[in-house]
Amino acid sequence: MENLMIDIIEITLPISVWIALLLLCAPILKRSYVSKWRYYMWLFVAARLVLPFKISLAKSITMPIPQTIPTAAQTPVVAAAGIDVQKLVTFVWILGVIVFALYQTAKYISFSGMVRRWAKNVTDERILHAVKAAKDFAGVTRDFNVKLCKAVTTPMVFGIVTPVLLLPCIDFTDAELTIVLRHELVHMRRRDIWYKLLVMTARAVHWFNPMVHIMASAADRDMEFACDAEVVRSQNVDYRRGYCETILRLVHNGRGRGTALSTCFFFSKKTVLERFKGILDEKIKRSGVVMFCVIAVSVAVSGGVITFAADSVAEVIEDDLGIVERPTPPPAAAPEPTAEPQPVYEDDTDDTYYEPESDDSADGYVYEDDYTAPEYEDYSDYVPDEPAADNSVNDITIGDERGSVYDRLGEPESSAANGMKDTYSLDDGSTAVLQYEDGTLEHVYIVEPSGGEADTDSTGVSADGAETLEE
Amino acid sequence: MKLKKIPETELDIMQVIWSNPTPITTTDIKRELEKTRPWSQGALQSLLSRLAERGFLKTGVLGKSKTFEPLVTEDDYLMVESASFFKRFGEKGTITGLVTALYDSKTISEKDIEELDAFIEKIKKEGK
């Protein structure tokens, strides 16, 4: 549950920055781009605010359990107070979401009761006929109820499951009716109530973030601009002017009614003026599809990057505490060549390498069933005999003089033209390459017959490596 | 006088009274109401007297039958009802975010409306 809160914060912060950027750029972009792209942009932002929620949830489930649990368990000193605070914050957040949701639901139910009490089915043939024409214009195919409602002063579509078109009791002229109905039916075809529901969900989840509420009112506005744009598309100036006048008439109609249910958005004079200008603007604008895609991808990614970074930080902390059961530590992942120097490698990293396997079976014997068993046996056979019995066998180590290596291993089978590399053939058919720099041994490779190259020289070739080369 | 919210059935009766010439007789009310669904005479009479008790109607007599007249206009009553709605959900808030309305008038002042009028006037002149 606490993780959920962290996920929310990880989403809310970068998205807030995007909202601020989009709001700042909007006035500039408005001049040359259609309002529709902003309308979709807000939809995308709202979806991002609501959905990652689930993605993050799935992610934390797939995380290996030992990585998360020890963090809390192993750092009780630091975390004891921290966890309580986190729990409290999470509790307050959930409470906020519930309060917001309940308030909005109560408002919706109360309004819907009011509508039911005052709405009457339309019987006027003129209105029904105009509705049919507007349906064709907007491309709405579904059936819906059309009602006259004294409690509203502006036409509206209401209802999440079954939309109802509500008209105020005003004597509309035919031209006004056409415009009003087209506007509402474009809303209906776009399922703008669902859009609003999504934005409201984002507000509920991010109720503590003022940027999300600002985004919601910007989305409301841009939804109207986008709707207006579609209604007046390829219409002449007279039509556009008529549109503005219709809105103005509804402004006047709402005026005398004071507290009647006319409020739907926070539309100020500025917004209405902006709408008038938008409606009258006949300039053909760019769709901004490319820009939309670029920004959409950036928005989608920005939340994820932070989440990812936070996980890495968590891992680093766990590493420091030494509590991580590393699933595949580097030695296990390193190549296991069949070359004989293999024992060197195993010797160095013995603990980590064998620990997991030797745990659940009899000691010693486990090695024989193992992939690397033969080398190990060779090695154990070899070690007691040679070094102890025969002192002529010496180490070759990085930094050895070329001469001293020659003393021990003999002349190389071949030397590179520049004198930097010597090669020796090994019993198993692979080739050892010794690389010199200024006469001292710099690097040792084992070249396998297939052509693959196993680098045995990381921390220095020890006695074992030299022995194998020596034969 | 404090008006109470009228229950739905009684509101149907009130709407008939508001939308017809008054004083109106019980028979006329019943005839209007039955355009949508059948009503029993007894139920109607008791609802009418309850509305009169609560101060929504004034009773009178016309010949042999009882008549009714509204004491509260429809607009006034609607105002009271929506005021109680806003009292619960705040004057400034939206009705509900979940409607797509043509526009909102709530936050527009007289002065703002004048400005909008002027803008439209200007456009009309430019068009001519």
Image (cartoon, coloured by chain):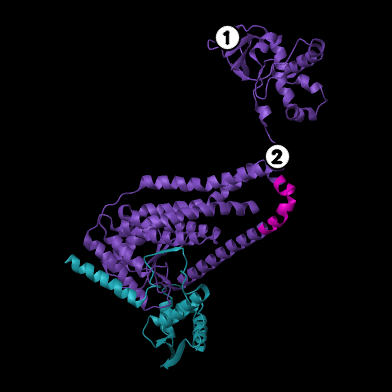
Image quarter where the C terminus of chain B lies is bottom left
Verify whether residue A217 appears in magenta: no
Residue shown at the point (71%, 53%) measured from the top left? A79
The purple one among the chains is: A
Sequence-earlier tag: 1 or 2: 2
Can you give x and y, in whole percent of width and height, for residue B5 in the image? 51, 80
| Quadrant of res A369 | top right
Q: Is residue A46 above or below residue A269?
A: above
Colour of chain B in the rendered structure image: cyan
Q: Is the magenta stretch mostly helix, strand or loop?
A: helix
Chain at numbered mark 1: A
Q: Which residue bears the numbered disc 1? A: A415
Can you give x and y, in whole percent of width and height, for residue A118 in the image? 44, 73
Tell which of B119 and A246 is nearer to you: B119
Q: Is residue A379 left or right of residue B102?
A: right
Amino acid under label 1? Ser
Tell which of A440 and A38 is nearer to you: A440
* Mark 1 residue element: strand
Q: Can residue A65 be seen in this view?
A: no
Residue shown at the point (74%, 48%) measured from the top left? A73
Can you give x and y, in whole percent of width and height, for residue A267 in the image? 39, 67
Q: Is residue A348 left or right of residue B83?
A: right
Graded by Cα atoms within 10 Å as few (under 14), some (14 to 19) or many (20 or more), the crowding at tag 1 reads some
Graded by Cα atoms within 10 Å as few (under 14), some (14 to 19) or many (20 or more), the crowding at tag 2 reads some
* Mark 2 residue element: loop
Tell which of A99 and A86 is nearer to you: A86
Q: Is residue A251 above or below residue B1?
A: above
Q: Which residue bears the numbered disc 2? A: A324
The part of the chain drawn in magenta is A70-85
Q: Residues at badges 1 and 2 in contact (C-beta under 8 Å)?
A: no
